[in-house]
Structures are given as structure tokens and as C-alpha cells.
Image (tube, rainbow, N blue to C red):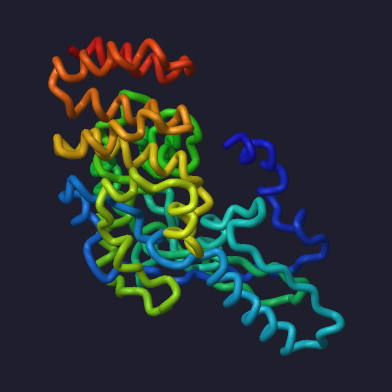
């Protein structure tokens, strides 16, 4: 995530993106789930996907809505004199503090935006314009003494309220992190294969939330609790086809199958060992290493020892060979 530091100066002032900008319009779109997103965590042989990634890619959906709003703003003035730009996670903007300044909500102790009307389930978008618009009042912090979001984090990713250590965050590890997931954090990931909703779902302000009404953002039924066996078997073509039009596709097949295999290792389902064994011949070392770890969790000592003797010596990737050695050391 070095890009955040590299663009720090640009992130500090939206006018670096549009010299002459006078106003920033912040938009929040509710994507509240219709069911408890944490219920999937109990289904050990199924994958848990973050609520925001179960429907269409929000970048495309919200960008279209922002363009409609921008056209309205331009239409209210002399179009030839108005400049507007729309952004949905596509520029170095500090969306959450800016949304708080605009009165949409406040940054909670989990560092995400919280709304008194919509709870934690918000996508954010921004419009920069040289129109001079009257400002709204900023929102104040209403977290109080609550620390539910901090206490529920499986990997202790919050060193303090309002501070997040991304290196321990399951959303970061399963989405942004490109290498093997650190061994000491794998068991805490459980069956999460893309993102994590724990800190959002337990926020008490969600009692005022309601299910999102944008049909394009609604969860696809096949992504509510997909079988881990199906996910781990995906090849490149099947991965692209299954997640076309959604945010998971940007992750790439190797990282996603890595996540599915970590979840299989946490499943305690011995029958899934056969699925992990198939991935020992995968073209991607990232996948092969995760398969070795999964088998080390699922197989009996004797079975893993036999498999290790047969396979470890032929492994040419150092990181995967280390997984074999680590698995053997657990016996």
C-alpha cells in the first residue's frame, strides 16, 4: 500500500485534482444487507464473502449515479462555465474524513464511516466542481464508550480506537496482499475468502440501518455462501466467468483460490482434503503453498508424512518447499 504514502500530498488537498475547484460534493450510497452477514461464518464448508462484493462492482454503479448528479449540477448553471469531475475510489481523495466534513457521518473507531440513519453500510463517491455551493454542517462522533468493533476483530487489527493496522486486517490480507498470508493469522481468517464484515456488522448504529434498495448492488444468491470446494476448483476461465461484473474479478484467480484453500484448512472437514490435494499441481506457487498448509491442517500425521515424502522433494519453489517443512514440523 505504498501508493498511499507516495500520494500523501495530493490526498491532503482535493484541489490538486482540479485547480480552481470550489466545492466537493460527497455522496453516500447504502448497501445494507438483507440478512446477517456474520451468519455465513458458521458454515465451515462455505466461503464468506464481504457484503459489498456480492453484487455488481460498486465503482461502475455509483459512477453512473455521480454522472447523473453532476449533469444536474451543470444544468443548474451555465454549462460552458462549469467544470466537474467524479470519483469512486479512483483518485487520491480522503473520502471518509471528507464525507464526515460534509455531514454524511463520522469515522468510527473501526476507521469506517458511520451514519446515524444508515449505520455502517455505505459506499462513498465524490464530485469536484468549480461551482460555489453552500457547505453542510459536519457530523460529530457518536461512538461514545462503545468498542464492539474493536473487540470482535479476529486478528486484533486495531492497536487503538480509530487506528487500523492493515497488516493484520483480514480485508487487506485476503484482497490487497499478494503473497502468502502470514501463518500466524491464517487460523483467524476462518472461512472468509474475500474481505471481512465483522467490525461493520456489530456496530450498534446498524439498528437504524435498512437493506439497500439499489438492485444492481443486491447480493447474488450464488455468492451468499458458495461451497469452498467449488471455489478452490476454479481455473482462470471459470474464475473470470463466475465473477464477471463484480469486484472479486480484480483480485485475480491465484489470490482468490489461495483464500479458498486457507478456508478449507480451517474447515475441519476432512473430505475437503481431496480438493486441496488437486491444487498441489497448480501452476501458481501461491496456490500450491496454500494447498500444502490446508493439507497440514486436515490430514492425519501419517497421511501428511507420506504425501510430504512423495511431493516435497520435487517442489522447485522455495516458499512452497518451506510450507512442506513447516507442515512436517507440526507433526
| Snapshot quadrant of residue 2 | top right
In this picture, is 147 found above or below 1? below
Q: The C terminus appears in which quarter of the rendering?
A: top left
Question: What residue do we see at 17% from left, 50% from top?
Answer: 43
Rendered position, 219 above or below 227: below
Is residue 162 visible to us here?
Answer: no
User: Residue at the location (28% across, 56% down)?
Assistant: 226
Q: Is residue 130 above or below residue 260?
A: below
- Residue 210's image quarter? bottom left
Q: Is 66 placed left or right of 32 in the picture? A: right
Q: Position of residue 317 (x, y in %)?
A: 48, 18
How far from the left and from the top, in percent, is residue 273? 21, 34
**Residue 16 location in percent, x, y?**
77, 54
Estimate the x, y position of residue 149 in percent, counting from the top left. 29, 48
Residue 312 in view, yes or no: yes
Comparing 283 with 139, the one in front is: 283
The number of callouts visible is 0
Residue farthest to the right, as pictured: 80
Quadrant containing the N terminus is: top right
Residue at x 67% of width, y 86% of height = 72
Amino acid at each position: 500500500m505504498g501508493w498511499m504514502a507516495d500520494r500523501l500530498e495530493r490526498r491532503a488537498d482535493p484541489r490538486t485534482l482540479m485547480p480552481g475547484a470550489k466545492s466537493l460534493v460527497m455522496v453516500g450510497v447504502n448497501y445494507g444487507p438483507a440478512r446477517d452477514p456474520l451468519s455465513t461464518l458458521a458454515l465451515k464448508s462455505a466461503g464468506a464473502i464481504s457484503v459489498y462484493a456480492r453484487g455488481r462492482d460498486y465503482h461502475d454503479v455509483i459512477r453512473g449515479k455521480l454522472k447523473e448528479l453532476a449533469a444536474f449540477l451543470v444544468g443548474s448553471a451555465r454549462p460552458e462555465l462549469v467544470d466537474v469531475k467524479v470519483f469512486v475510489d479512483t483518485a487520491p481523495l480522503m473520502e471518509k474524513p471528507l464525507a464526515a466534513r460534509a455531514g454524511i457521518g463520522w469515522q468510527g473507531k473501526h476507521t469506517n464511516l458511520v451514519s446515524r440513519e444508515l449505520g455502517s453500510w455505505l459506499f462513498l463517491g465524490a464530485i469536484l466542481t468549480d461551482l460555489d455551493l453552500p457547505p453542510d454542517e459536519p457530523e460529530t462522533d457518536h461512538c461514545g464508550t462503545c468498542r464492539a468493533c474493536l473487540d470482535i476483530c479476529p486478528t486484533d487489527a486495531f492497536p487503538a480506537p480509530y487506528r487500523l493496522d492493515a497488516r493484520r486486517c483480514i480485508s487487506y490480507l485476503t484482497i490487497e496482499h499478494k503473497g502468502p498470508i502470514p501463518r500466524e493469522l491464517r487460523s483467524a481468517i476462518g472461512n472468509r475468502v474475500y474481505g471481512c464484515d465483522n467490525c461493520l456488522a456489530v456496530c450498534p448504529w446498524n439498528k437504524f440501518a435498512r437493506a439497500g434498495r439499489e438492485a444492481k448492488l443486491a447480493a447474488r444468491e450464488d455468492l451468499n455462501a458458495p461451497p469452498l470446494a467449488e471455489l478452490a476448483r476454479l481455473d482462470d476461465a471459470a474464475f473470470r466467468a463466475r465473477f464477471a461484473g463484480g469486484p472479486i474479478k480484480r483480485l485475480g484467480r491465484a489470490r482468490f483460490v489461495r483464500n479458498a484453500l486457507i478456508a478449507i484448512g480451517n474447515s475441519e472437514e476432512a473430505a475437503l482434503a481431496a480438493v486441496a490435494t488437486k491444487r498441489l499441481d497448480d501452476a501458481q506457487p501461491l496456490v500450491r503453498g496454500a494447498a500444502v498448509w490446508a493439507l497440514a491442517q486436515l490430514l492425519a500425521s501419517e497421511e501428511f508424512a507420506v504425501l510430504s515424502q512423495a511431493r516435497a522433494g520435487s517442489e522447485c519453489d522455495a516458499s512452497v518447499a518451506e510450507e512442506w517443512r513447516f507442515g512436517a514440523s507440526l507433526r
